[in-house]
Image: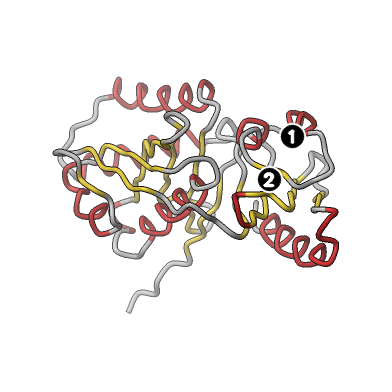
């Protein structure tokens, strides 16, 4: 009996590093072929360039990768369409890894992260994937367009992508100048979010590899709790 792979889901803070766009393209093409979409060499180049341009041009982008060891076997990515809506542009899992809960976990991570800055997730589904989104409580607006209203509250640790852009529109209970975080853009960053979508702690993996934590000075009794949660999240970033 074949053992179930140990899949790791990880936020991708800087999509321009390494082979990330090539991995995205490889996985998307494999899934398109599974649905009998023939993909030309030119289309592969288009897919890679599209992902690169989307990340560079959109302020509010996000991405999560699913890894079996060092191999990416699935991913999800998107961006904020406007103040009320987040757009899930891609969610793909290699055909041989389907049925293992990877797509579900990727979708949940995207929804949880989006809740920090917006109220609704929208997407255009592949025809063969509509049942997946229906199962996860998405309303099917027509043949392929889906939407889901997100929870109003989120409590706990979430990754922060393109830091300065995501942080501008949330309440931050820290004794810091938010502009300071522009220099940390695309570094691994996590926030601890409390009631009212308020950030009570931030943790960053600095360029020298040190983990730096800021906490709400008015909640000094929670300092150790916040630090433990954020350091644990940062430790899982490779």
Residue shown at 35% from the left, 74% from the top: 2
- How are the residues colored? secondary structure
Q: In the structure shown, which secondary structural element does the residue marked by tag 2 occupy?
A: strand
Q: Mark number for residue 227?
A: none
User: Residue at the bottom extreme?
Assistant: 1
- Give neighbour class at mark 2: few <14, some 14-19, many 20+ (Cα, 10 Å): many
Residue occupied by mark 1: 184
Q: For the residues labelled 2 and 1, say whether their Cβ atoms are less than 8 Å apart.
A: yes
Q: Return the x and y of residue 201 as percentages of the image width and height.
A: 74, 52
Specify whether 89 is left or right of 66.
left
Residue shown at 36% from the left, 63% from the top: 101
- Give neighbour class at mark 1: few <14, some 14-19, many 20+ (Cα, 10 Å): some
Residue shown at 82% from the left, 62% from the top: 223
* Residue 119 against residue 108 in the figure, above or below: above
**Which image quarter: residue 23?**
top left
**Which image quarter: residue 151?**
bottom left
**Which image quarter: residue 228?**
bottom right
Residue shown at 50% from the left, 41% from the top: 63
Q: Return the x and y of residue 99 as percentages of the image width and height.
A: 29, 63
Q: Return the x and y of residue 90 as percentages of the image width and height.
A: 36, 39
Q: Using the numbered discs, state the Cα–Cα distance from disc 2 to disc 1 in whole angstroms.
A: 8 Å
Front-lying residue, 15 or 3: 15
* Residue 48 against residue 26 in the figure, above or below: above
Front-lying residue, 221 or 43: 221
Quadrant of image for the N terminus: bottom left
Residue occupied by mark 2: 189
Marker count (numbered): 2
* Residue 110 against residue 69 in the figure, above or below: above
Q: Return the x and y of residue 179 as percentages of the image width and height.
A: 76, 29
Front-lying residue, 128 or 140: 140
Marked residue nearer the N-terminal end (2 or 1)? 1
Front-lying residue, 86 or 218: 218
């Amino acid at each position: 009996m074949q053992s179930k792979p140990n899949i790791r889901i990880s936020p991708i803070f800087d999509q321009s590093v390494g082979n990330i766009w090539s991995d995205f393209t490889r996985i998307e093409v494999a899934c398109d072929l599974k649905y009998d979409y023939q993909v030309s060499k030119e289309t592969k180049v288009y897919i890679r360039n599209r992902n690169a341009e989307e990340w560079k041009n959109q302020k509010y982008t996000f991405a999560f990768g699913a890894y079996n060891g060092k191999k990416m076997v699935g991913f999800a990515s998107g961006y904020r369409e406007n103040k009320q809506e987040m757009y899930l542009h891609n969610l793909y899992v290699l055909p041989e890894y389907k049925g293992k809960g990877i797509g579900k976990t990727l979708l949940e991570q995207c929804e949880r992260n989006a809740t920090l800055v917006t109220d609704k997730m929208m997407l255009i589904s592949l025809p063969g994937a509509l049942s997946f989104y229906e199962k996860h409580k998405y309303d099917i607006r027509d043949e392929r367009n889906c939407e889901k209203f997100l929870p109003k509250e989120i409590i706990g640790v979430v990754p922060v992508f393109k830091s300065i852009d995501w942080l501008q529109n949330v309440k931050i209970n820290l004794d810091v100048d938010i502009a300071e975080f522009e220099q940390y853009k695309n570094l691994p960053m996590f926030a601890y979010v409390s009631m009212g979508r308020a950030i009570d702690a931030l943790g960053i993996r600095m360029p020298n590899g040190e983990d730096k934590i800021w906490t709400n000075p008015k909640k000094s009794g929670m300092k150790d709790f916040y630090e433990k949660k954020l350091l644990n999240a940062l430790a899982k970033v490779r």
